[in-house]
Image (spheres, rainbow, N blue to C red):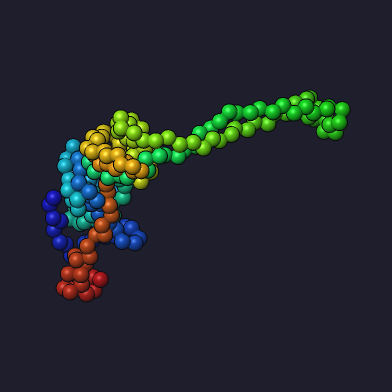
């Protein structure tokens, strides 16, 4: 990444209220997509970045001036996550039971609302819930256990993240726990805001205080 040259403060314009920022990588990975609403990308798709690398700059060059706009948006990347877990061996869950439909007869002669005279029957639907449980056993490593961990991981990362691949590294069973480690390939927004340094303005204030 090239370092921007320093220019006098009088040649830097701010078009955003609040602290403008660059976007940097919160983790390493391979870039897959840019979704910027402001700023300029500094990398390209299929490029590998490290934690802290600049992804998008909030300072744009316009002729002999540099305009501070602040970078906004998302930058998506693929990266591997090693996920260690510990689950109770007996898992409790709730399932839906049977749906019950109750038909209630309404005597039209007793109905004072003439607009609803035609409704001879009304229905009432209820669905029961059944609490049950099952035991995790060997052989479920790549089926039920994997799906349970995927659900946990999706809840932690949020709706923007996508699990693209996985590798089960280790799963062990004891009397009441199931412990293990799974590698997940995740695609997620890795952009993190980093305020643009005020070093340029500070240097100019020393030379030309009237420009500050």
Q: Nearer the viewer, residue 161 or 5?
A: 161
Report the number of discs. 0
User: Looking at the picture, how far across and down is residue 79, in whole percent?
Assistant: 22, 41
Residue at horizontal 13 percent and vertical 50 percent from the top: 1
Q: Residue furthest front?
A: 175
User: Looking at the picture, how far across and down is residue 88, in whole percent?
Assistant: 37, 43
Q: Quick one: quadrant of the C terminus? A: bottom left
Relative to 126, 10 lies left or right: left
User: Looking at the picture, how far across and down is residue 46, in whole percent?
Assistant: 18, 37
User: Looking at the picture, how far across and down is residue 159, in whole percent?
Assistant: 38, 41
Using the rendered image of the protein, determine whether residue 33 is visible from the camera's viewpoint. no
Q: Nearer the viewer, residue 105 or 157?
A: 105
Quarter of the figure with residue 19: bottom left
Residue at horizontal 75 percent and vertical 28 percent from the top: 104
Relative to 115, 11 lies left or right: left
Quarter of the figure with residue 77: top left
Quarter of the figure with residue 127: top right
Using the rendered image of the protein, determine whether residue 41 is visible from the camera's viewpoint. yes
Residue at horizontal 83 percent and vertical 27 percent from the top: 107
Residue at horizontal 30 percent and vertical 41 percent from the top: 174
In the figure, 131 relative to 100: above or below?
below
Q: Nearer the viewer, residue 59 or 133?
A: 133
């Amino acid at each position: 990444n090239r370092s921007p040259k320093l220019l006098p403060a009088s040649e830097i314009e701010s078009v955003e209220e609040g602290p403008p920022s660059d976007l940097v990588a919160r983790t390493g990975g391979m870039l897959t997509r840019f979704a910027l609403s402001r700023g300029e990308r500094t990398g390209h798709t299929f490029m590998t970045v490290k934690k802290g690398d600049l992804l998008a700059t909030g300072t744009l060059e316009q002729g002999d001036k540099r305009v501070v706009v602040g970078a906004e948006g998302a930058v998506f990347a693929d990266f591997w996550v090693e996920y260690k877990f510990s689950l109770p061996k007996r898992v409790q869950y709730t399932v839906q039971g049977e749906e019950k439909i109750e038909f209630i007869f309404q005597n039209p002669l007793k109905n004072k609302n003439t607009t609803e005279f035609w409704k001879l029957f009304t229905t009432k639907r209820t669905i029961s819930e059944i609490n049950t449980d099952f035991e995790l056993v060997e052989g479920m490593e790549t089926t039920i256990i994997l799906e349970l961990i995927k659900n946990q991981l999706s809840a932690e990362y949020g709706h923007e993240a996508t699990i693209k691949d996985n590798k089960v590294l280790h799963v062990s069973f004891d009397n009441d726990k199931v412990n293990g480690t799974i590698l997940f390939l995740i695609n997620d927004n890795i952009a993190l805001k980093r305020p643009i340094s005020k070093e340029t303005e500070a240097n100019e204030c020393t030379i030309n205080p009237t420009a500050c």
